[in-house]
Image (cartoon, grey):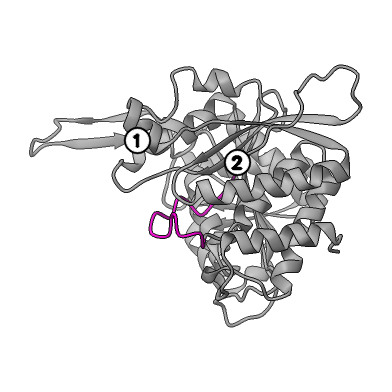
Amino acid sequence: MTTTSPRHPGTGTARRHVVDVVPGDGIGTEVVPAAVRCVDHLAASFGFTVEWRERAWGCDHHRAHGRMMPVDGLEQLASADAILLGAVGAPDIPDDVTLWGLLIPIRREFVQYVNLRPVRSLPGIRSPLRSEAPIDLVVVRENVEGEYSEVGGRVNRGRPGEFAVQEAVFTRTGVERIARFAADLARRRSGRLISATKSNGIIHTMPFWDEVVAEVAGASGVRLEKVLIDALAARLVLRPESVDVIVASNLFGDILSDLAGALAGSIGVAPSANLDPTKTYPSMFEPVHGSAPDIAGMGIANPVGALWAAAMMLDHLGEPAAAARLVSAFEHVLRAGTATRDLGGTASTEEFTTAVVQALDEGAP
């Protein structure tokens, strides 16, 4: 990975962005360089530069140091404009160690309370559904509280009476801000918002969620539909075209976004943004697919999720034209029939990326 000019160049006129790159584990180390290559290719054409600060953190770092990142890792990231993450996880290290050692601390320290996951039918990718109606929806997931709290514990470990307690934490501040973000997004799209809930069975937190989301949606002027999570999962399979923007708690949003990505044809192309909408702290962008250790090192990983995540990052950094060009380029390549093996094609990661770069040069519409 190359590093361009510094963040504070003095009299230069180009826009400069500092991005911390955490390739992480598995195929993350293959798809992130593809995204960096494409962003660097766009930079000259669109009048900006990027200072890439590579962080070799993840499972290899854990094996060497007993930690997923350095003790001062969060302090190192704090001065960035954005973070580009590849993947986290390996078979020999428990998932709770890898996620709570890297990804989740970043989300929480930098108040990245929005997890934004767009799901859209892409050219050349067939949905497993019988219906050919195009899918175009966004899951807005609450990202720092809810069911994924740290409140709880295990008692009597290893004994017959061992038990575990996990508490879900929903605050008015947390629900209001995610509902407001989702309502604002819905207003710019169709004016329709679906709230995922389970208030018929979860007696305290979900009715509270319903009440606060309804208050925010009512004040915003969007049309709110409250749908039980099980019914919503079925609806995504049967009528995904009826869904536009979903607002959901941490757990529900996590599950629904992966389901929706699979319905669009492949979880390998799905992007994700972990946003601090205030831009007080850096936001983080990542593909959803995970480290995929079964194909790591084979050079066949699908880079679309990372490319789309990089486009979301560019948009967040104030480079919407470059972001749109990158999305158009990988869509053009898919439409032309070039695809990696997970999509039924034969292209390697390098071949697909090279085709995207060529499309960027040709100004793909």
Label 1: how many residues lie within 10 Å, few (<14), some (14-19) or many (20+)? some
State the residue in front, 160 or 62: 62
Q: Give the label on residue 97, or none.
A: 1
x 44%, y 18%: residue: 71
User: Does residue 290 show up magenta in the picture?
Assistant: yes
In the image, residue 282 lies at what x, y percent? 66, 28
Task: Work out whether residue 140 can be spotted.
Answer: no
* Rendered position, 255 above or below 170: below
The type of residue carrying mark 2 is Glu
- Give the image quarter of residue 45: top right
Magenta residues (range): 285-300
| Callouts 1 and 2 close, C-beta under 8 Å | no
x 32%, y 27%: residue: 66
In the image, residue 322 lies at what x, y percent? 82, 47
* Rendered position, 13 above or below 21: above
Q: Which residue is mark 2?
A: 211
x 40%, y 31%: residue: 61
State the residue in front, 340 or 167: 340
Label 2: how many residues lie within 10 Å, few (<14), some (14-19) or many (20+)? few
x 60%, y 46%: residue: 33
Calculate the distance from the C-alpha at mark 1 to the C-alpha at mark 2: 35 Å
State the residue in front, 68 or 150: 68
- Give the image quarter of residue 5: top right
User: Does residue 24 show up magenta in the picture?
Assistant: no
Quick check: 339 left or right of 218? left
